[in-house]
Image: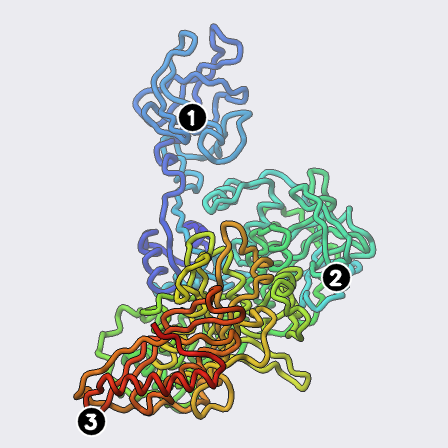
Amino acid sequence: MKISTRWLARHVDISGLSAREIAEGLTLSTAEVEGVERFLPHLSEVVVGHVVERAKHPDADKLSVCKVDVGGPELLGIVCGASNVAAGQRVAVARVGTKLPGDVTIKKAKIRGAESCGMICSERELGLGDEHSGIWVLPADAPIGQPVAESVGLDDWTIEIDNKSLTHRPDLWGHRGMAAEVAAIFRRQMLPLDVALPATGKGPAFPVRIETPACPRYIAVPIDGVKTRRSPDWLRALLLAVGQRPIDLLVDLSNFVMLDLAQPNHVFDRARLSPEGIVVRMARTGESLTTLDGVERRLGADDMLICSGPVPVALAGVMGGEASKVSAETSSLLLEVASFQPAVVRRTAQRLGLRTDSSARFEKNLDPTLPAKAAAHFLALLRALEPTLALPAPITDAGSWKDPARTIRLRGARARDLLGAEIQDGEIEDILRRLGFELVRNGDAFDVRVPSARATKDLTIEQDLVEEIGRIHRYGRIPERALVGALVPPLRDASWERRRIVRVLQDRLAGGARFHETISHSFLSDEHLARLGIQGLPHVQVVNPAAEGVSRIRRSVLPSLLATLADNRRRRDEVRLFEIGKGYSPSPAGEPAEVHACALVWAAAPAGDGARFDRDPLVRLKGAVADLLVGCGWSAPAWERASETPPWAHPARCLVARLEGAAEPVATLAALEPLVARRLELTGDLACDVACAELSIDALLAAPRAQTATRPIPKFPAVKVDVAAALPLDVEAARLVAAIEKAGKGTVAASDLFDVYTGPNLGTGRKSLAFHVTLESDDRTLSEHDVARFLDRLAREVAELGGELRRA
């Protein structure tokens, strides 16, 4: 947003303050200033000239040769092509060497044989508008030789404010609000502004009917005796300084009042409105309106309309309609100044992609007392420019609204404590009065009356007032001091323990295990649920889904992880992913139950026939899960076949992990069902072996932790034995591990599976499992005889499993 220093001076005494000083004060106390620029700096080089003589060019019918007095010792000879140049005029003259917009430098030249030592300029050549049909004729009393910027009020500076720093301050979206800030910062006096509504005629009031609570106030003022024309130069200059293009008197005055008081308004051609009057209502589906920019807009039930009888004539708070705009023939007007709910205006502007100066202000929760002040200001300005103005009927003020002004209790001690500065009560009172607040002493505190302009959503609690004191006192003046406080450890409750476990899981998985963490949305598409075969399960439904077909919340975390698998496989051969989050299980009795889980996926390109079994992602993920549990303080898990297989899991390759003393399994591990893999588009170049796991963090919290114990270094050497057993295919490796430990009678220190083999020499339906077994004793060195007895006992145990020990 741009503000003009000349405009500010209409509201506050800024004598002796430069534009840069004002900008610095605003930056330190109010809002971020993005830049300070002189308005049209070349106008300080363009001077007022007096056309002493004008003669026809001897060799060109459309050119004139003029003698122009610019206050120097000699008259300048200037060739001019404008048809409206005449002797006796005051004009804008760019002398030789002057730089104009468009990188134009004025040079001495001969035009059809006549010497020209300058240029008599039009408005467009000076960057003041689009007018180029003739030269710019200045007021007859403009001082000769004076810079044009000074003579016609264009000597101005523009301060550009970052809009984002004003979103909480609707009062600062106008020059008077900014002037009030300047007055408070620099201890200057605000100039009075007459905002009393004038007397009106006694004719019938213009009818207004409000049919929606989204319009709490609507003021309508019938006006006669005014015709649109070119705006005066002072008004055009101020609008140009803040980036507004002047159009005509009524449009310019409407924009001026909005930029002056931050209250948008609109002027209708009253002759083009229905005798039924104005109706404010929500749009009906299928309605349309052609706005002032000539675009037909399709409307919906969330859009608010200003209607003339049943016909829409404006999009409330955003833009007026083409059909009721003011034209050169307009002789009767209707001024609209209203309050609208910010959310309604914001939704309409965003949906239509139609952000305007008006909508930007209405979105900020404007002061509902402001419409009457803005209407009075508009009428006072218009009457000063058009003395024939008449108000034929009473002003209509419709709607139900209330003044948001409030009183807040402020304690001086609390302000000093929060700011860390010894600001005495006298300075506190002075600062708040400079900001326009009324104060009443109440013991050790103040009862502060916050005016409506600051009370809509800006200042609501004591801390807001403390912030006001701090910014005007200046935070840079608060002395630095060391922060001293007691460090108290957090309460180690169940919530703390849950967070700790999550951090430990993240650290181990993203560290040594080399997994990558993902963060997914908790809602899933119906299509993805169908791929996993779980679309028939009950899910929590989304009332307002982000997209069509994405209406259900995940029951567990793993489906979200699987949704990312194909995309990750396109980028690398091996994929290791994990996600820690929540699933939601629907409950008919009330709120959904939260399921806190850690999901893991390990995918690798197919190993092919004859590959080592320990390259299988399922085997590797099983080891990673076991390491994760032990590393996080639990005991080594016991694996068993799952009694119920999830739809996404391979029915023959699904295990659950149990911890000693735990009531329920803490993890589920499985290979991905091949049909599901094809549905997830893991085919062709993306084909891979996939293993999945999901750890229940809730079950882990309930499971007892392993007792930590130290074990002395063995005194006697270990003996390593490789054993292999041929077994039926349905015998699990865990049963063979138990047989090895039983046969060892307490001497088995470790048993590691290193090979799985199936082949024709074993017979149909059989497999071979090979283990590295480490035997140790605490009281002696084991001999070959001990190893032989171990193998004999193991052979008997294997026979009971339906197999035989394979000997070399």
Residue 712 showing in the rendered view: yes
Residue 540 percent location from the top left of the image: 64, 74
Which is nearer the N-term, disc 3 or disc 1? 1
Sequence order check, earlier mark of 3 and 2: 2
Q: Earlier in the sequence, mark 2 or mark 1?
A: 1
Residue at x 41% of width, y 18% of height: 78
Q: Amino acid at mark 1?
A: His
Residue holding disc 1: 50
Q: Residues within 10 Å of mark 1 (few under 14, many from 20)?
A: many
Up the image or down, 83 lies above or below 759; here it is above
Residue at which label 2 appears: 281
Residue at point 58%, 77% (across, down)? 584
Taking the image as shown, residue 357 lies to the left or right of residue 3, namely right
- Foreground mark, 3 or 2, reads 3
**Circle 1 sits in a helix, a strand or a loop, which is it?**
strand
Q: Which of the labelled discs sits on residue 779, or is there none?
A: 3
Closer to the camera: disc 3 or disc 1? 3
Rounded to the nearest whole Å, what is the CA distance between mark 2 and mark 1?
57 Å
| Amino acid type at mark 3 | Asp
Q: From the viewer's side, name the closer residue of 175 and 751.
A: 751
| SS type, badge 2 | strand
Q: Could you say which is closer to the camera, residue 313 or residue 674?
A: 674
Q: Give the CA separation, mark 3 to mark 2.
A: 95 Å
Q: Is residue 276 above or below residue 64?
A: below
Q: Which residue type carries mark 2?
A: Arg
